[in-house]
Image (spheres, rainbow, N blue to C red):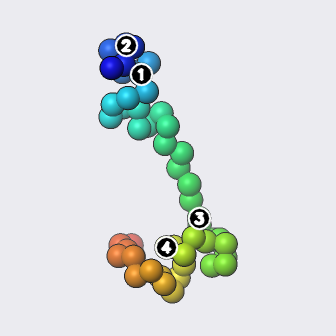
């Protein structure tokens, strides 16, 4: 049970995700530094969405 019901001051619930989320981008990184899920060859066959 959270200590408060004020959404801005609790670490549980849907609004807490935005407070703890850290966005990470890998734009222009060499393939060798990327996690295998994100490499150009897609060795793990992860389904992807391609934007034009």
Determine the residue positioned at 53% across, 82% down: 40
In which quadrant is the N terminus drawn?
top left
Image quarter (top left, top right, bottom left or bottom right) of the C terminus: bottom left
Q: Which mark is drawn over residue 10? A: 1
Spatial CA distance of label 2 from label 1 is 6 Å
| Any part of residue 6 in sight | no
* Residues at circles 2 and 1 in contact by the CB criterion of under 8 Å: yes
Q: Position of residue 18 (x, y in %)?
A: 43, 37
SS type, badge 2: loop
Q: CA distance from mark 2 to mark 3?
A: 37 Å
User: Do the CB atoms of the residues marked 3 and 1 lie less than 8 Å apart?
Assistant: no
Residue bearing mark 2: 4
Residue 37 numbered mark, or none: 4
Image position, residue 20 (x, y; %)? 49, 37
Mark 1, secondary structure of its residue: loop
Question: Mark 4 or mark 3, which is nearer to you?
Answer: 4
Q: x and y percent of residue 16 in the render?
A: 41, 32
- Sooner in the amino-acid sequence: mark 1 or mark 4: 1
């Amino acid at each position: 049970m959270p200590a408060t019901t004020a959404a801005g001051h609790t670490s549980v619930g849907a609004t807490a995700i935005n407070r703890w989320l850290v966005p990470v981008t890998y734009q222009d990184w060499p393939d060798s530094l990327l996690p295998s899920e994100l490499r150009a060859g897609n060795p793990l066959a992860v389904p992807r969405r391609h934007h034009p």
